[in-house]
Image (tube, rainbow, N blue to C red):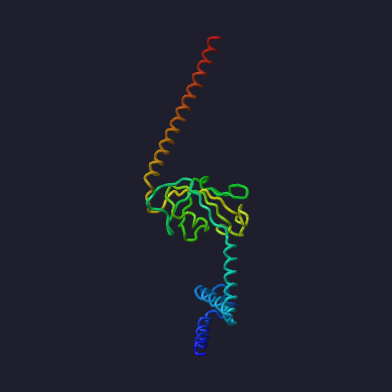
Amino acid sequence: MIERAGERQRSAERWGPYRSRDYHNHPGTHLDLPFLISTIHSIKNSIKNNRPIQTTTMRFLTLSIAVLASATSTVLAADPELNIEVTRAVECERKTQRGDKVDVHYRGSLQADGSEFDASYNRGSPLSFVVGQGQVIKGWDEGLLDMCIGEKRTLTIPPNLGYGDRNMGPIPAGSTLIFETELMGIKGVEAPASIVKEAASEETEGVKEKIKAKIEDAAEAVKVTLEDTDAGGQEHNEL
């Protein structure tokens, strides 16, 4: 009798935080897994030895199962995740971190029909903001971390990480967004040598193309002038 009384006392002490009042007021917030496992073993032993199972024990088990079922349904109903595709990888020592001021070029479109709704490339100026501080949509705050200067990523952003159920100009509510992004710079951080070299090479190629275009224009102008001169000389001879 003394041992059973002690068992009842310990059971009451363990049951304290899991009273039905707590469960009804805060569903899904109280679950002691070690005690749940111990309770299951206790029930199995009681059944095996043909002993009655205490009402409080069954009550705890029932509530625990309800909590687990609720947690499982929450996980299964979780929002879709952000998808990140690196389209140009870059090696660097310093990647973007929360709190960095960054410059990002982008092109945004709707996944539904592929229509473009905005692009910084068209304006010739990247967007400047502090990453990871809520200044932009969550999909950007999460999708542009651990990124090297010069790196390009395509972000597929579900509504819960974009504009949600709000209409934003050409963006309908509940839209999944596709952003082609390019990290142009991090304040206070030098660009990787490979990117600097590539940029210099692209600039050189650009200059070469401009020079080539000017030479072609000049050659065309000379050709036209010579043709006009020949035509004028022919008319003079006919006279």
In this picture, is 124 found above or below 102?
A: above
In this picture, is 10 found above or below 87?
A: below
Residue at the front extreme, as displayed: 49
Q: Viewed as shown, does residue 178 lie left or right of 195?
A: right
The spot of residue 238 in percent (x, y) is 55, 9
Viewport quadrant of the C terminus: top right
In this picture, is 208 found above or below 159?
A: above
In the image, 137 versus 218, the foreground residue is: 137
The spot of residue 120 in percent (x, y) is 51, 48
In the image, 83 versus 139, the foreground residue is: 83
In the image, 15 versus 94, the foreground residue is: 15
Q: Residue at x 55, y 58 (%)?
A: 161
Residue at the bottom extreme, as displayed: 1
Q: Kindly tell me whether residue 74 is visible in this rendering.
A: yes
Q: Residue at x 49, y 19 (%)?
A: 226
- Number of marks in picture: 0
The spot of residue 42 in percent (x, y) is 54, 77
The spot of residue 149 in percent (x, y) is 42, 49
Q: Kindly tell me whether residue 239 is visible in this rendering.
A: no
In the image, 4 versus 153, the foreground residue is: 4
